[in-house]
Image (cartoon, rainbow, N blue to C red):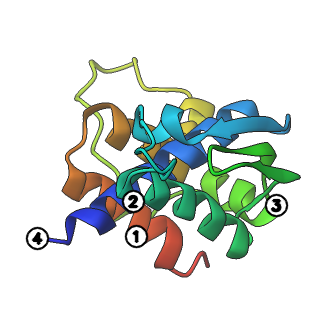
Amino acid sequence: MADIHIEEFYKDTAVILAQLYAAFPRRVNLFVEDIAGPDEPDEFGLHSKRHMACFGALLWLAEEGLIRYVDTIRQEALDQAVLSHAAFTRLSAPAPSELLNTPPARPPGQDLPGSVRQDLSTHIHLIRQALRRGTSAQISQVMQQVFFRDPS
């Protein structure tokens, strides 16, 4: 079992990439609370470790060249964030067959069109599917594929 903070990192980055992909190519503001949930700063105005970890994930994605943004809004959000070319092409690319779930059996003559099959085989589809009904382990597996597997 992975460390909890790593599983949260994978989930946060999955949510971030899915949100930016859904808005692409528009620039949007990404708020930490929309990703990691509400946070009340303490009596000194400091955010929780969970909030700061999510904010760190946003910054890490930018440092690694997966997203771009204009500015930070305190430690609350990224202003005008957008996917980079590298992230967009990676998310749009087909995932390896071992990660794809086999589709349910269909009666003869009711095969999915090629364009639909292609959409269902992309990394972004796997991310969305894992976020909708996946476990932490499934989200981690998909995000490790997105981050660490050679795209060729």
Percent position of residue 44, x then y: 47, 51
Q: Residues within 10 Å of mark 4 (few under 14, many from 20)?
A: few
> Do callouts 2 and 1 mark residues in contact (Cβ within 8 Å)?
yes
Q: Secondary structure at mark 3?
A: helix
Q: CA distance from mark 2 to mark 1?
A: 8 Å
Task: In the displayed orientation, state which residue is furthest to the left.
Answer: 1
Name the element at disc 4: loop
Numbered circle sitting on residue 85: 3
Three-letter amino acid code at disc 1? Gln
Label 3 and label 4: CA atoms lie apart by 33 Å
Residue under label 2, please give it.
10
Residue at position x 45%, y 42% in the image: 41
Q: Name which of mark 1 and mark 4 comes first in the sequence.
A: 4
The N terminus sits in image quarter: bottom left
Earlier sequence position, callout 2 versus callout 1: 2
Residue topped by disc 1 = 144
